[in-house]
Image (cartoon, rainbow, N blue to C red):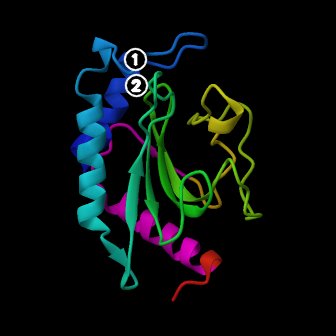
Amino acid sequence: MIHYFNSICEFRQVNPVIKGHSLKVSDPALGNIRDTLLDFKTQLENRYPSFRDIELSMKISKGFSNFPNVLYACILPPGQAVPNGIYTAICFDILGRCALAGCVESKITSKGLPTVKRTKSPKIDVDGASERTKYNSVFVNPKEFYYPLENSHELDQHITESLNLCFEYLKLS
């Protein structure tokens, strides 16, 4: 998992988000990043197939015609979706400095969780270009994980804490 995490950060370092310039999904500059995201998702699926004996699912950022500014992987409890739910997310900084992880509520459909309002210029920026993709302030328990990630223990621990929060908010066993 560490390799894929660091590779995603490295991609953003080489291809930072620049306002007004987006990468097309067909752009050769994307190279293997889609495969890297899929491999990261597979690693998460292998580590978190279930939680408290309840099956989980994973979603990653994909984009349609434009490649997403904010690359992410989401761990979804049953009945939850990225546009409408409570789940655990790992969102990668738009400049490749690292990632922000934690329990989140959907940006599109607020669930009224006690989210942390992160400052306008946080160290790790996970705000995309549109209002629908501004994720800096949707985290209940945001924690920054800097590049290069050398050990996944702290990230795994935070993911577990975040899943516990999700399950509490969703009133799952």
Q: Which mark is residue 105?
A: none
Mark 2 neighbour class, 10 Å CA radius: few under 14, some 14 to 19, many 20 or more: many
Q: Looking at the rendering, which quadrant does residue 154 occupy?
A: bottom left
Q: Which residues are magenta?
A: 143-168
Label 1 with label 2: CB-CB less than 8 Å: yes
The main secondary structure of the magenta stretch is helix
Q: Secondary structure at mark 1?
A: loop
Q: Which mark is residue 15?
A: 1
Up-down relation of residue 126 to residue 73 (above or below): above
Query: Residue at image x 66%, y 51%?
Result: 138
Is 146 a magenta residue? yes
Up-down relation of residue 49 to residue 173 (above or below): above
Where is residue 119? Give x, y as percent.
74, 39
* Residue furthest bottom in the image: 173
Query: Which residue position holds label 2?
Result: 12
Q: Report the side of 64 relative to 125 (left or right).
A: left
Where is residue 151? Give x, y as percent.
28, 53
> Label 2 amino acid?
Arg
